[in-house]
Image (tube, rainbow, N blue to C red):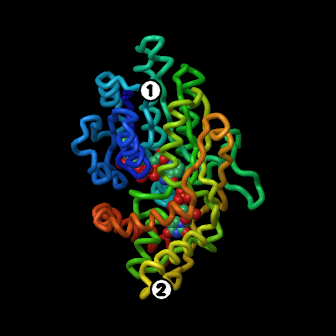
Amino acid sequence: MQTWLVTGGAGFIGANFVLAARRLGAARVVNLDLLTYAGHPENLESLKHDRDHEFVHGDIGDEPLVAKLLAEHRPDAIVNFAAESHVDRSILGPQAFIQTNIVGTHALLAGALKHWQGLSAAAQRAFRFLHVSTDEVYGSLGPNDPAFSEDHQYQPNSPYAASKAAADHLVRAYHHTYGLPTLTTNCSNNYGPYQHPEKLIPLMIQNAVAGRPLPVYGDGRQVRDWLYVEDHCDAIRAVLDKGKPAETYNIGGNAEKPNIEIVQTLCRLLDGRFPDKAPHARLVQHVSDRPGHDRRYAINAEKIKRELGWQPAVSFAQGIERTVHWYLDNDAWVKAVSNPDHRDWLEKNYQQQGRGI
Ligand code: NAD
Ligand code: TYD
């Protein structure tokens, strides 16, 4: 069985990836996570007795720690999910994004390179550094523009997107200059279990259930492509298994939707579950827009389909229904992750930014 060093594996996508990897017996996992406000050991509760999952509390920017983990576990691959990931937080405080997404990713690359250079030729050929990135590095599309393909120009607009773009460039340079066998994936908006309740879909579910306003930024006509998180995890395993070093792969859900439509869909599903509280859509409140808000993202995922045979298996209708059920059934999880930092955050984002709810 392979060993993977997964970073950020206590966060939303990382935890789903680690849980699936262990469920499928795909690899032994060493899981390095700093447990910021977004990392939750609760996500990994079901692996408590799994001897093939080792959790390590630490920073990807801690070079001696990374060197020690690489020497001790000799992983076949590093999968880098660790990041500051929320655009609104990057607007209020970009520094943490520069630190983890750029400086931290660079430290991880430097550690990986040193380790890789000491491997046998066969082990060097087999090793992979997979960096998980975002479609936001490509900037914003007009309504009729073709979807982002892998050779689309980088035009990041938020501090978050700029920090991810910088990391992508460093990954590219580590292959081009030193030969490190890197892979980069750029995916669209994920949704599903274990997503922090600061992000659109869990936030709207929580607020609607509690009878609180549903804060839609601006006119709510901004378009995102939505990818069910388990499909994303499948795609990453396909890239690890069959992807060509130095290549990048765009991963999408074939589900472009305006935000307001997402909110209305959630309201409809909740009306079905709680008819006495219907219509939940009465809670929708248009609030001041996000500064520099990108209008549209869309992914052309033809390359990964053609070259690696991957395409999403879960439709948006299936995925969103599963997601609503998961949040309703996991109220204890939501309460556990809604720590004081989360309450401070809501206060800052929705009141200090003049969103007035
Ligand atoms: P998340 O914020 O839920 O989780 C990030 C995890 O990284 C947390 O567990 C956190 O504790 C950990 N972390 C943060 N800084 C760290 C550091 N310095 N060292 C070690 N661990 C650290 O994020 P997510 O939504 O799961 O996103 C995972 C990755 O996927 C990110 O790189 C993000 O940019 C990318 N991505 C996310 C989406 C999405 O829709 N969520 C879309 C495209 C790309
Ligand atoms: P988000 O989940 O923050 O992801 P991203 O900004 O990375 O795409 O937001 C998804 C979309 O939803 C984005 O266009 C911003 C919008 N949004 C709202 O309208 N209201 C909210 O309260 C939040 C958190 C997001």
Q: Is 92 positioned to the left or the right of 137 in the image?
A: left
**Which quadrant of the rendered structure holds the N terminus?**
top left
Q: Which mark is residue 294?
A: none
Residue at position x 52%, y 23% in the image = 180
Query: Residue 142: horizontal and vertical position, in percent?
Result: 74, 59
Q: Which mark is residue 278?
A: 2
Q: Is residue 193 above or below residue 172?
A: below
Q: CA distance from mark 2 to mark 1?
A: 54 Å
Q: Is residue 124 above or below residue 23?
A: above
Q: In the image as oriented, which residue stretches furthest toward the left? A: 49
CB of mark 2 within 8 Å of CB of mark 1? no
**Quarter of image, res 30:** top left
Which class describes the residues within 10 Å of circle 1: few (<14), some (14-19), or many (20+)? some
Q: Amino acid at mark 2?
A: Ala
Residue 312 in view, yes or no: yes
Q: Which mark is residue 110?
A: 1
* Nearest the eye: 135 or 88: 135
Q: Amino acid at mark 1?
A: Ala
Query: Residue 13: horizontal and vertical position, in percent?
Result: 44, 49
**Badge 2 residue CB within 8 Å of ligand 2:** no
**Badge 1 residue CB within 8 Å of ligand 1:** no
Residue 95 in view, yes or no: no
Query: Residue 87: horizontal and vertical position, in percent?
Result: 51, 57
Indicate which label's residue lies in the foreground, 2 or 1: 2
Query: Residue 293: horizontal and vertical position, in percent?
Result: 61, 62
Q: Is 144 positioned to the left or the right of 313 in the image?
A: right
Q: Is residue 38 above or below residue 18?
A: below
SS for dot 1: helix
SS for dot 2: loop
Q: Earlier in the sequence, mark 2 or mark 1?
A: 1
Which class describes the residues within 10 Å of circle 2: few (<14), some (14-19), or many (20+)? some
Residue at position x 52%, y 62% in the image = 318
